[in-house]
Amino acid sequence: MDKVQAILLEALRQGSATAGEQRLYRAGKLPGLLPSRSSLHAEAAVVALRDGLIEIVRTETRGKTAVEWVRVTPKGVQFVLDRESPVRAMDELQALLKLNEQGFPGWVAELRQRIDDIGERFLGEVQALRQRFEALVGRVEDSLKRTDKYGPPPVPGAAGAIPWAHDLVEYLERRAASGMGDKCAMPELFGHLKVKEAELSIKDFHIGLRRLHDRGSVRLLPHEAPDGPPEPEYALLDGPAVYWYAAR
């Protein structure tokens, strides 16, 4: 990964954990998606806008300076997930460990021929190292079995009544596992589902969330800022509560 890609990945990861809009560049102590306007950070901003990973929400003009406010798009979140998935990393680690394990017998035999003077002490160290590799391979396999690639499915009956239930739960788990926080804002979650569920309405989205919440598949969390959520049409109202986030 080159420097621009690394900067972009870190910016999108941090930006995805922030609800609503934010400055494109940091200004003094005021936070921003990118820490400065240096050449590498500017290039990362150009790539992000060009590829639709972020979108400009509004622009403020202060004197001769234009301050752009942006937010991470569902495509930007997917960009982070595709490169940061811990399950994908475990798959790669598992393949590497198995490759090394298969190469052990020939490696040990060759070393035994060259260093007969070391004898039992050397063989004991090799056996201990082999056991550590075998134990690590077993731990990786057990982890993959427990997570079933991206975690357990929703509770029985949920997927049948709500076609997109498993996709929603899987997305929340992958998002949390990638370091972007446990809770996901309603607009981001709705945007992800709309990619596959083009006919999904906000009303049906809210009805499905309530059912999943009642069945214990997801948790609904309120918006706590005093000025209310930035996109109120996505908020789920329940009496005095204004739910704005969902979590596994």
Image (cartoon, helix red, strand yellow):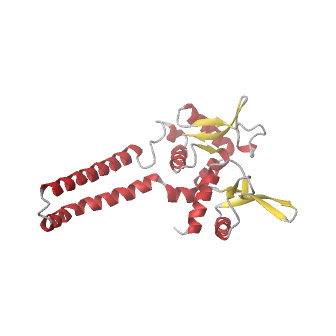
Q: For the point 66% across and 66% down, which residue is it?
A: 41
- For this rendering, which residue is in front, 35 or 90? 35
Q: Where is residue 186 drawn, in percent x and y?
A: 65, 44
Q: For the point 14% across and 60% down, which residue is it?
A: 118
Can the viewer see residue 198 in this picture? no
Q: Where is residue 137 drawn, in percent x and y?
A: 30, 52
- Work out whether 77 lies above or below 41: above
Q: For the point 64% across and 53% down, which residue is it?
A: 15
Quarter of the image that includes the C terminus: top right
Total tally of numbered discs in the picture: 0
- For this rendering, which residue is in front, 224 or 7? 7
Give the residue furthest to the top.
Answer: 239
Q: Is residue 17 left or right of residue 27?
A: left
The quadrant holding residue 28 is bottom right
Give the residue furthest to the right.
Answer: 63
The quadrant holding residue 60 is bottom right
Give the residue furthest to the front.
Answer: 117
The quadrant holding residue 44 is bottom right
Q: For the point 42% across and 50% down, which residue is it?
A: 149
- Work out whether 216 lies above or below 55: above
Can the viewer see residue 231 in this picture? yes
Q: Where is residue 29 drawn, in percent x and y?
A: 73, 52
Q: Where is residue 114 drawn, in percent x and y?
A: 15, 68
